């Protein structure tokens, strides 16, 4: 378990890289981070235990 400050830094890093790679997007109005799915590419979550 990481201290809160380190965990926040890690999340910020992951989100920034995700946005840079255009995998994640941010909705300013709601403050929501979401998966950026390419046009015409369906996305479904993998079943639990499938990975």
Image (cartoon, helix red, strand yellow):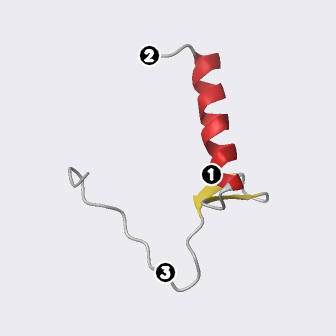
Q: Toward the viewer: 1 or 22?
A: 22
Residue at x 66%, y 27% (from the top left corner): 9
N-terminal label among 1 and 3: 1
Q: Which of marks 2 and 1 is in front?
A: 1
Residue at x 60%, y 41% (from the top left corner): 14
Q: Toward the viewer: 29 or 48?
A: 48
**Of the numbered discs in the image, which one, if any, rests on residue 1?**
2
N-terminal label among 2 and 1: 2
N-terminal label among 3 and 2: 2
**Quarter-of-image position of residue 5:** top right
Residue at x 20%, y 50% (from the top left corner): 49
Cβ–Cβ under 8 Å for marks 3 and 2:
no
Query: Which quarter shows the N terminus?
Result: top left
Label 2: state its secondary structure.
loop
Q: Mark 3 points at which residue?
A: 41
Q: Name the residue under label 1.
A: 18
Q: How crowded is mark 1: few (under 14 residues within 10 Å), some or many (20 or more)?
A: some
**Quarter-of-image position of residue 29:** bottom right
Label 3: state its secondary structure.
loop
Q: Distance between the residues labelled 1 and 3?
A: 18 Å
Q: Which of marks 3 and 2 is in front?
A: 3
Task: Answer left or right for 47 relative to 21.
Answer: left
Q: Distance between the residues labelled 3 and 2?
A: 36 Å
Q: How crowded is mark 2: few (under 14 residues within 10 Å), some or many (20 or more)?
A: few
Tell which residue pokes out farthest to the front in this image: 21
Q: How far apart are marks 2 and 1 (CA)?
A: 23 Å
């Amino acid at each position: 378990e990481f201290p809160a400050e380190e965990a926040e830094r890690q999340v910020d890093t992951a989100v920034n890289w995700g946005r840079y790679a255009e995998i994640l997007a941010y909705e300013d109005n709601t403050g929501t981070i979401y998966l950026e799915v390419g046009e015409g590419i369906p996305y479904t979550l993998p079943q639990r235990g499938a990975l």
